[in-house]
Image: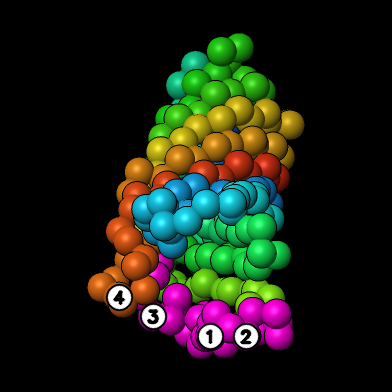
């Protein structure tokens, strides 16, 4: 009888211990992220027209659609106000500079650069779960330094007296002399965790270094700082460990 009671007690302790361990949630989760957003790169007008050579023209910077994907690890203990996130991502920086003048000449310059890099963010949970505020940064290598395109009506017959280069030649020169650079950016945003698996994030990143480097040229294109901005909305799925 005593042996039976002892065995039952040991079984009960093991069962309860196992139940408690199984109820514990690992603070580390792995995630995959898919998102899209908008990007702009200001300052390129000062590269192409660095001085007041002429008047009666205007430039306009237009935001462009960009995708982003990534894999990451997140550490957050249930009930804690602080968490961290780090991982690897692919993203784009893009923009479009539109030129128009009183002679009806117009052109569009569209740099679109691809990056692969790392990110790290501190996450603050004011209510200890669900809603969170993130702050941190990311750094990435440029995969296509010549990722710039050019469109114009400069080959129209009404501009024949100006002896402009062809659109194809102008684009070739831009690819050669205006080079995309690596990306180092700071940023952050807001997120919300739905249950144990889904995240929604809205984040903003500001480039710290110039997006474009101007090489020595004969076209009066000058070196000028250009800083990209990205706004990204993404959804993530997290896996328990």
At horizontal 63% and vertical 44% (from top left) the residue drawn is: 232
CA neighbours of label 4 inside 10 A, class few (<14), some (14 to 19), many (20+): few
Which residue in the structure is indicated by mark 4? 217
Q: In front: mark 2 or mark 4? A: 2
Residue 176 is marked as 3
The magenta stretch is 155-181
At horizontal 57% and vertical 66% (from top left) the residue drawn is: 109
Q: In front: mark 4 or mark 1? A: 1
Which residue in the structure is indicated by mark 2? 160
Q: Which of the two discs, 3 and 1, labels the residue nearer the N terminus?
A: 1
Image position of 173 (left or right of 23): left
CA neighbours of label 1 inside 10 A, class few (<14), some (14 to 19), many (20+): few
Q: Say whether marks 4 and 3 touch (CB < 8 Å).
A: no
Q: Which of the two discs, 2 and 4, labels the residue nearer the N terminus?
A: 2
Q: Say whether marks 1 and 2 touch (CB < 8 Å).
A: yes
- For residue 174: magenta? yes
- For residue 121: magenta? no
């Amino acid at each position: 009888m005593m042996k039976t009671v002892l065995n039952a007690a040991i079984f009960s302790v093991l069962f309860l211990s196992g139940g408690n361990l199984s109820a514990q949630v690992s603070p580390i989760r792995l995630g995959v992220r898919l998102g899209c957003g908008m990007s702009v790169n200001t300052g390129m007008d000062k590269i192409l027209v660095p001085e007041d050579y002429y008047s009666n023209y205007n430039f306009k910077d237009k935001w462009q659609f960009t995708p982003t994907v990534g894999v990451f690890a997140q550490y957050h203990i249930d009930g804690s106000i602080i968490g961290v996130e780090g991982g690897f991502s692919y993203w784009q920086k893009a923009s479009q500079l539109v030129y128009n003048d009183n002679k009806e000449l117009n052109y569009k310059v569209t740099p679109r650069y691809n990056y692969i890099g790392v990110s790290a963010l501190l996450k603050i949970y004011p209510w200890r779960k669900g809603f969170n505020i993130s702050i941190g940064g990311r750094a990435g290598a440029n995969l296509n330094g010549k990722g710039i395109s050019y469109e114009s009506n400069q080959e129209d017959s009404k501009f024949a007296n100006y002896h402009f280069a062809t659109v194809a030649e102008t684009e070739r020169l831009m690819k050669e002399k205006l080079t995309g650079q690596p990306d180092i950016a700071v940023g952050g945003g807001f997120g919300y965790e739905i249950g144990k698996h889904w995240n929604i994030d809205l984040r903003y990143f500001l480039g710290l270094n110039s997006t474009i480097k101007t090489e020595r040229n004969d076209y009066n294109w000058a070196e000028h700082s250009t800083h990209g901005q990205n706004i990204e909305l993404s959804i993530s799925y997290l896996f328990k460990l």
